[in-house]
């Protein structure tokens, strides 16, 4: 290659590389400027600025404290009809879903052998009583020894005792209604062999239905005998009934620390075993500081809320009492007039500046 050709070739390479070099420089400058612009935008959006929060002012609220617990409807009387002895069912009369009177025969077990034994004892008793009367006349005139008469009288007493025992065995083969009530579904059929573990049917007395429920031991003073509670039987219709407390379990459950209470419904019709809500009036018009549930920060050993003091976020430990669906009672840690953060709690930092956007009003839903 001659010098002239070589120089032209170098110029050509220079002109080809120049646009590429300019493109690289421009791209690098664009990336640098873009990163700087994003950083400036992030700082402008709030990095280092005050946290925007909504607050409420704590004040003493007059509320009616109602404790809500779960209850179960129970029948006034309930029994499982079982035979006392094993045997073959020879008679069965279970009018399912109907009311039967006390003493009505529900079922019989084969007792032919016991009836035969009873008849045999009756015949022996007749002969023994005749012999005893004859010997009594003879002993009156010293015709026989007193010992002979005593033996005949003892025979009469023994036979009567045997007959009473046999009759008791016969009674065990007859299943009767223990009280007046509604009989349930039949569990066996006639001709079945049953044992004392076999359930023939169930019976329940549906008048004066009762409700059993448990309350914490701290509310024991509010469940005295003769007191009233409100019972929600049908949540769909919101129908409440009144129940009168008739008894409480004398011992507190050591596992749950609850006490069992039984009340009788004054009215209302429902099925035993049904679920019901029980509302207990723990206190009336009690003054309490209430805060929303979402303003509480739960920790392992305590609970905290964020207060606004001097334009900064201050974390304080509180103790809570009764809890409702939307609010919680604060028993310790808050004073009337404190400004409590209810929105933006997760973004607040201790002693960091905050800006109050709005002051909300607390709405307490009555039960």
Image (tube, rainbow, N blue to C red):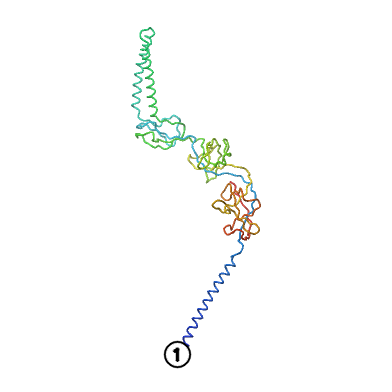
Rendered position, 293 above or below 177: below
Q: Is residue 99 above or below residue 324?
A: above
The residue that appears at 45% across and 90% down in the rendered structure is 6
The quadrant the N terminus occupies is: bottom left
Please tell me in which quadrant of the rendered image residue 85 appears.
top left
Which residue bears the numbered disc 1?
A: 6
Quarter assignment of residue 240:
top right
> Which residue is situated farthest in the top direction here?
141
Circle 1 packing at 10 Å, graded few (<14), some (14-19), many (20+), is few
Image spot of residue 340 (x, y percent): 62, 54
The image shows a total of numbered marks equal to 1
Task: Judge by depth and name the residue closer to the eye, 140 or 243.
Answer: 140
Residues 163 and 215: in front is 215
Residue that protrudes farthest toward the front in the picture: 301
| Up-down relation of residue 12 to residue 29 (above or below) | below
Instruction: Give percent across and percent down for residue 323.
Output: 57, 48
Q: Position of residue 111 (x, y in %)?
A: 35, 28
Q: In x, y percent, where is residue 164? A: 39, 23
Q: Answer with the quarter of the image where residue 279 lies.
A: top right
Which residue is more in the foreground, 355 or 98? 355
| Image position of 335 (left or right of 84) | right
Left-right relation of 69 to 5: right
Q: Secondary structure at mark 1?
A: helix
């Amino acid at each position: 290659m001659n010098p002239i050709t070589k120089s032209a070739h170098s110029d050509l390479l220079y002109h080809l590389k120049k646009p590429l070099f300019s493109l690289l420089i421009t791209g690098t400058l664009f990336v640098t400027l873009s990163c700087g612009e994003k950083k400036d935008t992030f700082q402008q959006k709030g990095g280092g600025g005050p946290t925007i929060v909504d607050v409420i002012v704590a004040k003493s609220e007059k509320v009616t404290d109602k404790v809500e617990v779960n209850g179960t409807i129970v029948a006034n009387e309930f029994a499982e009809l079982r035979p006392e002895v094993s045997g073959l069912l020879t008679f069965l009369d279970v009018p399912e879903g109907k009311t039967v009177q006390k003493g009505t025969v529900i079922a019989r077990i084969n007792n032919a052998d016991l009836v035969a034994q009873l008849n045999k004892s009756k015949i022996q008793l007749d002969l023994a009583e005749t012999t005893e009367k004859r010997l009594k006349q003879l002993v009156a005139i010293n015709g026989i020894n007193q010992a002979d008469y005593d033996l005949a009288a003892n025979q009469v007493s023994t036979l009567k005792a045997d007959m009473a025992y046999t009759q008791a065995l016969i009674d065990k083969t007859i299943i009767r209604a223990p009280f007046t009530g509604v009989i349930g579904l039949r569990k066996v059929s006639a001709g079945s062999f049953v044992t004392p573990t076999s359930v023939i049917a169930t019976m329940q007395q549906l008048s004066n239905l009762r409700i059993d429920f448990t309350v914490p031991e701290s509310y024991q003073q509010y469940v005295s005998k003769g007191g009233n509670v409100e019972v929600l039987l049908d949540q769909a219709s919101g129908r409440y009934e009144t129940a009168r407390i008739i008894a409480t379990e004398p011992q507190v459950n050591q596992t749950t620390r609850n006490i069992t209470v039984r009340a009788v419904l004054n009215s209302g019709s429902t099925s035993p075993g049904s679920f019901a809500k029980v509302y207990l009036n723990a206190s009336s018009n009690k003054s309490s500081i209430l805060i929303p549930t979402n303003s509480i920060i739960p920790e392992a050993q305590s609970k905290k809320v964020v207060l606004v003091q001097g334009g900064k976020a201050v974390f304080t430990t509180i103790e809570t009492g009764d809890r409702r669906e939307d609010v919680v009672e604060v028993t310790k840690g808050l004073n009337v007039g404190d400004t409590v953060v209810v929105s933006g709690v997760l973004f607040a930092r201790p002693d960091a500046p905050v800006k109050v956007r709005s002051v909300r009003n607390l709405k307490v839903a009555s039960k």
